[in-house]
Image (tube, rainbow, N blue to C red):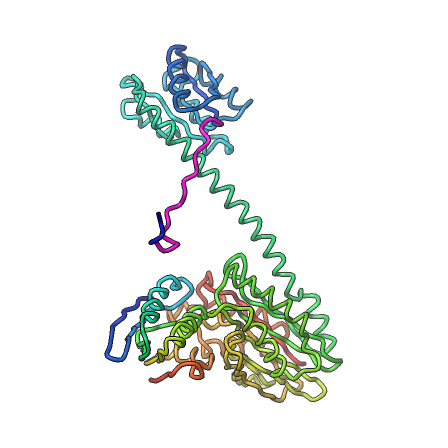
Amino acid sequence: MSAGLPPDARPETVENVPLADCRVLVVDDSRFSRAMLRRLLEWVGIRTVLEAGDGEQGLALLGETNADLVIADVDMPRMDGLEFCRRIREVPAWSGLPVLMQISAASDPAGMRSFEAGANDIISKPLNAGECMARIRLHLEKQFYVRRLSQFHRRLASDLRLARGMQMSLIPDAAAQQALAARHGLALSGHFESSEELGGDFWTLFDLSPHQLGVLIADFSGHGVSAAINTFRFHTLIERMPPQGHEPGVWLAQLNQPLKDLLPIGQFATCFYGVIDTAANTLSYAAAGAPSPLLLDSDGRVTPLDASGLMLGISSAPLLTVDQLPFGPGASLLLYSDALTEAIDQRSGGMIGEEGLMPLAIHAFTGGAEPLPRLLAAFDGVARRPLSDDLTIICIHRP
Amino acid sequence: MDYAVQSTDQGLNISLTGRMTLIDHDKFRAVVDSIERLNGGICIFDLRGLEFIDSSGLGMFLIARDVAQPKGVDIQLLGAQDAVRRILQIAKFHTLFKIAP
């Protein structure tokens, strides 16, 4: 038994290939050969054997009914096996159909012409029953597993597409973002891309009061499906525990506790939550191990904010950074996930880093309206793609 | 990431080199197993050769800590270089581990 093995080393159970359900087409002008192949196929366990006397008939039969394997003779009248095989390969739906070619020393000595025509394997005449049966079984099994795998792949891909749509719906759409920001006299745009189908990044906005807009950005450890599931949990948590009426630091600490209970050891979220108050002209924030947001004033001076802290979900005693800074007209704020600074700079081969991000941010925010497209273009100019992590960027400007 | 585990008088010295990311989870399980076999003592992670650590890497240290605590093992992170040191700072890991240059 596998008791002593770690779970990953356990051998996979091999599923039996349902040979009885397979259909095999035999294309041969010799009735004797067809009968012999039929016998061998029946010994292998195949119940449905279709027969054709030449390539043309074979193609017609294939068009009418499906086959899992084709055995053809190279030498046939009207349409020989090579032409038959080439025609099969021209049809996209049959590109993966296994074709075994029976060759003789006279017709195609080394089988090269058969392989060039698209055959998967050759069987030399006179037939050796054992070898012939082994090859038939081998190709049917291979066909079965490839089909099984591609079915699984298709199902997973469509599942992930659906889930991706669901994840995108957690993030405010562009029109909603801009409308909400505009009501607060702010220009805001966000960029969200996952390195895989699903990601661990999350961000959203809160309409706290007529003069207070809240913005939250979180990044769950890891990426892919498990990180994405955590973003859904987080979203639910926020719905249950909205930020209204709480100071940023108090609210993040409140979110921390259920996350600590929910997340397994080793999983957590970096988080930044800021409140822009356009009456008090301030940015108040709390952070838990997030990348340093950049604050830019109207002259293009950049201040990286301290967003250090124990990430949410690690400890029941949260350790957050809490601060308040002026945020008057002309100020801008750049929030991002670490994929932005941890991307590789093609010029140096090192990471872009905070130092590398600053000139990009200044370029983006001092070049007029719409800083996000400028930032993305500048980033794409230096960063090596594809990125290995999920990327979120939020640009906020107070005109 | 590559690792080397050495027994010391006090416990273990584990040196980590390269990039510590999501794909190293399985490898790190062996490291955690060796910590689990300790009873008391100090487990030093030598990070001088570690070039980069992502959030999954930080998570692995948390898992190691979770295993070490009930065994009375003290985990220390030594010699982190620029990028890694910065990430440990942002995450305020000095509140969870002894961190030294």
Instruction: Name the residue at the top extreme.
Output: A31
Find residue A364 and report its horizontal and vertical position in percent.
56, 75
Asked which quadrant contains residue A128, the reply is top left
Which residue is located at x 51 percent, y 80 percent?
A: A292
| Residue A275 visible (yes or no) | yes
Where is residue A91? Give x, y as percent. 50, 30
A284 in relation to B12, above or below: below
Q: Is residue B74 left or right of residue A380?
A: left
Magenta segment: does it hold A11? yes
Q: Give the answer, above or below, for where A315 lies relative to A155.
A: below
Q: Position of residue A182 (x, y in %)?
A: 72, 74
Query: How many marks are shown on the rendered structure?
Result: 0
Q: Nearer the viewer, residue A218 or A179?
A: A218
> For the C terminus of chain A, which image quadrant?
bottom right
A85 on left or right of A205: left
Nearer-the-camera pick, A309 or A78: A309
Q: Which secondary structure type mostly characterizes the magenta part of the structure?
A: loop
Question: Would residue A351 be visible to someone looking at this image?
Answer: no
**Quadrant housing residue A198:** bottom right
* Part of the protein shown in magenta: A5-21
Image: A71 above or below B72: above
Whether the magenta-drawn stretch holds residue A322 is answered as no
Residue occupying image coordinates x 54% and y 62%: A199
- Can you give x and y, in whole percent of width and height, for residue A27 in the image? 43, 18
The residue nearer to you, when weighing A79 against B68, is B68
- Give the residue at x 66% y 81%: A398
